[in-house]
Amino acid sequence: MKSIDPADLAMKENYKILTGTIVPRPIAFVTSVAEDATLNGAPFSYFNIVSADPPMISIAVQRNPSTGKMKDTSRNAAAKGEFVVHITDEDNVEKANETSASVAADVSEVEMTGLKTVSSTKVSIPALQNAKVRFECKVEKIVPLGGTEENPSCDLLIGRIVHYHLDEKVYRDNGHSDYRKLKPVSRLAGNDYAKLGELFSLERPK
């Protein structure tokens, strides 16, 4: 058993251990709108459920390591108070990956990759047409974390879901969804991703 103190490692080494062992990770494909109306799109695999009552999700967005500034998604969410999360699946993962390219803040990754959009129901942020699941979110809280109080290293976005959109093939009834038909894609380490593999069930003890 290898025993390591994270304080002895560089940030990149900690990153490699975390992303190589906390797997698979679901990928949030997020749209947000800048103050100049640029529609931003970006994928994030530091993503999960926070609560079901009310329904909330979390996305950790790392700050720019060289400048310490908020990335577009965090800055836009803070300014507008809204964003849309799409579940990354086999049909949109390549486009999601394309939007992770480093571009200027006034360049729309959504337009750059040719993604089509639809209007949202309860937020002002456009959504992606080719996603089987999307969550319209209002910002519940943004928590700066890591680094120092003056220069945090990331922003934890907590979004309260105010509207769901689920493909009819994915949604069954009474809140149940068919993840086999969703065909979600998860993030591993490096350039690796994973599809749904072998499934098994375990009954919870009573």
Image (cartoon, helix red, strand yellow):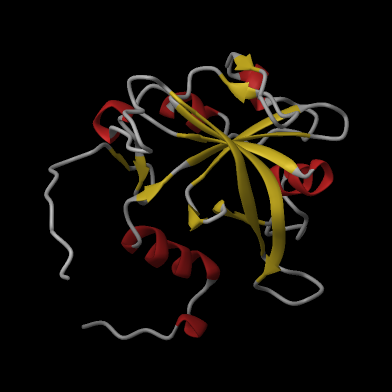
Reply above or below: 156 against 112. Answer: below
- 158 displayed left or right of 5: right
Percent across and percent down for residue 147 are 68, 74
- 180 displayed left or right of 174: left
Image quadrant in which the C terminus is located: bottom left
Pick the front one: 4 or 92: 92
The quadrant in which residue 60 appears is bottom right
Percent across and percent down for residue 32 are 70, 35
Pick the front one: 123 or 65: 123
Q: Residue furthest right?
A: 36
Percent across and percent down for residue 136 are 62, 35
Which residue sits at x=62%, y=16%?
Answer: 117
- 180 displayed left or right of 148: left
Reply above or below: 176 against 171. Answer: below
Pick the front one: 114 or 79: 79
- 192 displayed left or right of 163: left
Reply above or below: 170 against 145. Answer: above
Which residue sits at x=81%, y=41%?
Answer: 80
Pick the front one: 206 or 119: 206
Percent across and percent down for residue 51 are 51, 58
